[in-house]
Amino acid sequence: MLISSTWQIIPNETVTLPRSYSLALGKELHQRINLSLGTERVPSTTFAGLLGRHEGAGNFVSLSSEETYQFSLCGLSEQSSKAIASLDLAGKLSFLGATFRVCDRIDEKTSYEELYATLVANEPEPIREFSLQFLTPTAFATQKLDLPLPIPASMFQSWLNRWNHFAPVYLGSDELIGYLSSSIALKKHNIITRPFQLPRGYAIGFVGDVTLQTLTRTDPLLANVAHLLVQYARFSGTGRKTRLGMGKVCLGSDRSF
């Protein structure tokens, strides 16, 4: 089972929160579903929030009672997906002394088997171009420094690692990444870098729009596997620290903030 749940919330009044509010919100939500942060080698949840218009000053941000914000939780395993599905906020959410009214929740549910059957096993007509929107700072771990760039090989490696860890259908490893790297190109992008507050210090990641393109004569099966992993990114997130709020991605016109 896979689930992506998105909540829309409105502050009861204009509130000022520390820039690290995302960490506090993520911790609060994981406590509510009885899942620990930082204990899994490969995180079975991804989180993003709060997305929406805000004003920043120093180490704080202000959220307006006239704006709607959203946050999301995604489950990559049966256990975490069921826990997220059962999360009931009872119309309100409070953390760091602020209270928000919950005005909507949208759930998208599927399974690894369904994604694989629909996008690969049934041999659909290949999609040749993929448009992604990175909503929260995204970066990839390297030996020395984080890499805040949309390198296709790094993106596919991130998605594939999570897929192979949780899915019952194994897709392959280094050889597949090699094929994808030589067949999928970065067509265009419009990105900027932004800092993301961490428990100690901060990370620099990129946000913005990225378009990937399959090269001419790419094998249809390989193009479909690429499409599968791109679709999976909506649940798995991309890159490092996805359970804390980094690496949130949506596709095409899915973005609402």
Image (cartoon, rainbow, N blue to C red):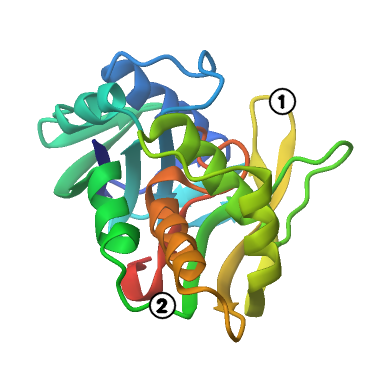
Q: Residue type at mark 2?
A: Ile
Quarter-of-image position of residue 27: top left
Is residue 173 visible in the rendered structure shown here?
Answer: yes
Which numbered disc covers residue 162? none
Q: Residue type at mark 1?
A: Arg
- Give residue 182's position: percent from left, percent from top: 70, 68
Depth check, front residue: 166 or 257 = 166
Depth check, front residue: 5 or 169 = 169
Task: Locate the N terminus by quadrant.
Answer: top left
Compared with residue 58, is residue 134 higher up or lower down, i.e. above or below? below
Which residue ends up furthest to the bottom in the rendered image? 216
**Residue positioned 29% across, 46% down in the render:** 13
| CB under 8 Å between discs 2 and 1 | no
| Residue, disc 2 | 127
Is residue 5 visible in the rendered structure shown here?
Answer: no
Give the Cα distance between marks 2 and 1: 41 Å
Give left or right: position of 235 versus 197.
Answer: left
Quarter-of-image position of residue 150: bottom right
Which numbered disc covers residue 200? 1
- What secondary structure is found at the residue carrying circle 1? loop
- Which numbered disc flags the more N-terminal residue, 2 or 1? 2
**Residue positioned 21% across, 47% down in the render:** 110
